Amino acid sequence: MNNFIHRNAALVLAPILTAFAIAFYNLISLLIRHHHTMLHDLHKAIGAVVLFIGFYGIIRYMQSLPEDES
């Protein structure tokens, strides 16, 4: 069971970190009263995909590192 969780942690953590990053960005946007446009929404969607891929890659890389036996 622990091995299953370890193997699939990236699939859980990447969307959570992506959603957190998007929510943080939206909070900043609301604070400066930015008016959303269609092009801006498209940029946010592309950014969400890039964040997801980035977080997924980082987590998978960390999982592939050898574990310390100390």
Image (cartoon, rainbow, N blue to C red):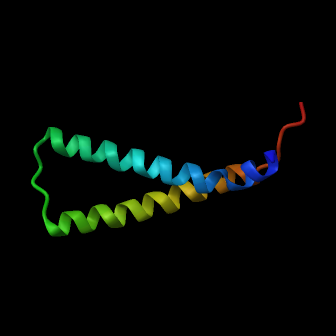
Could you tell me which residue is drawn at 10 percent across and 44 percent down? 33
Q: Position of residue 57 (x, y in %)?
A: 59, 59
The answer to whether residue 52 is left or right of residue 13 is left
Could you tell me which residue is drawn at 76 percent across and 50 percent down? 65
Q: Is residue 22 above or below residue 40?
A: above
Residue 2: image quadrant is: top right
Please name whichever residue, 60 or 19, is drawn nearer the observer in this view of the structure: 19
Residue 45: image quadrant is: bottom left
Q: Position of residue 26 (x, y in %)?
A: 25, 47
Quadrant showing the C terminus = top right
Please name whichever residue, 68 or 49, is drawn nearer the observer in this view of the structure: 49
Could you tell me which residue is drawn at 51 percent across and 58 percent down? 54
The answer to whether residue 41 is left or right of residue 1 is left
Could you tell me which residue is drawn at 27 percent across and 65 percent down? 43
Q: Is residue 14 above or below residue 20?
A: below
Q: Position of residue 67 (x, y in %)?
A: 83, 42
The answer to whether residue 70 is left or right of residue 23 is right
Q: Residue furthest right?
A: 69
Q: Residue furthest front?
A: 1
Q: How many marks?
A: 0
Please name whichever residue, 1 or 46, is drawn nearer the observer in this view of the structure: 1
Q: Residue furthest top?
A: 70
Q: Position of residue 60 (x, y in %)?
A: 66, 56
Q: Is residue 32 above or below residue 35?
A: above
